[in-house]
Amino acid sequence: MLSVVYIIICIFCLAISIAGVLLCHRWINTYNAGFHKNYLYYLIAFYTFAFYTIWGQIIVRTVLLSLGVKTGIIESVATTFPVLGVPFLFISWIMLINMVYSMTDMEMNARWYIIHFVMLAFVIAASWILYAFFIENAHATYEGLKYMETGLLMVFEAIYFMIFVFLYFVFRQRIKTTALQQYNNFVALMVLGFLLRVVCLLFSSQGPWVLPMVVLLFFASNFIPVTYMFMHADQMFNPVKVQGSGEVKVKLLVEKFQITKREREVVLLICSGKTNQQIADDLFISLQ
């Protein structure tokens, strides 16, 4: 029964990941904003890390246990997954910072790449030092190593999220005022997702029946801001192509740019495919 639950949760996690990535890719084609490209790379890197680290460990443990491998060897192999998955997580952190600059139409300073490189080297070195310390320490436990690895990664992710929030509040005056509230909400949901992941990790050792729900919430943590973006994308970004027509789209356009009734009539006629002369004739106005 438990194995069936894990399979169902794995399918849900895969569905969440694919839906998030596809939605973000769709926005790239619709809005052509640098923000969406950075957001897409962020989601791909995050979900790759999550699958590699979480489901990779679960699958390896299950396979090796079925083959009768000793518990010590299984744990030794499984605990290397978070270390090997660090590059994927680190790419998501880089994209997180890039998202702030693209949201505020700022050029990222080249010094950031040096900072990223130093941080990556430090994270990898610290992870391997912890692993080496564990191997040489006879009193250390695999459970303790797992908590140390998790704690280290969470500390660095917390640092990047604090930088993310700090830069956003420094540069947010560059965002158009009509969409500022939506951007504020999006940033808040990103931080909420991080806090949810921290809570998930705190409850990850509560038992085999609790773990599937914790894993599902971990994957869903980044889908919350994606859902919000899906609901408010038209208010936050200027589309480069029309995705259908209708009163809802026209209403959003009117509210966003505060156009007049006459301008609204012109827009509707343009969307219907009429030429300038036809529009002038219909509205009894001059082409001049």
Image (tube, helix red, strand yellow):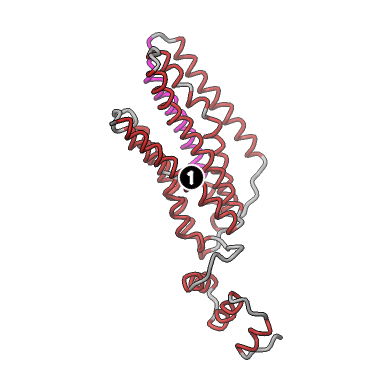
- Is 238 covered by the magenta stretch? no
User: Left or right: 246 with respect to 121?
Assistant: left
Image: 113 above or below 187: above
Q: Quadrant of the N terminus?
A: top left
- Which region of the structure is painted magenta? 139-164
Image: 139 above or below 212: above
**Residue 275 occupies which quadrant of the picture?**
bottom right
As shown in the figure, which amino acid type bears the numbered disc 1? Ile
Image: 234 above or below 214: below
> Of 55 and 136, which appears nearest the observer?
55
The residue that disc 1 covers is: 18
> Of 175 and 202, which appears nearest the observer?
202
Residue located at (41% from left, 18% from top): 64
Residue located at (55% from left, 61% from top): 237
Question: Percent x, y for residue 16?
Answer: 43, 45
Q: Quadrant of the C terminus?
A: bottom right
Question: Percent x, y for residue 136?
Answer: 46, 9
Q: Residues within 10 Å of mark 1 (few under 14, many from 20)?
A: some
User: Left or right: 184 with respect to 206?
Assistant: right
Residue located at (56% from left, 26% from top): 122
SS for callout 1:
helix
Residue located at (33% from left, 30% from top): 3
Question: Percent x, y for residue 188?
Answer: 43, 50
- Is 158 covered by the magenta stretch? yes
- Specify whether residue 1 is in view: yes
- Specify whether residue 140 is in view: no
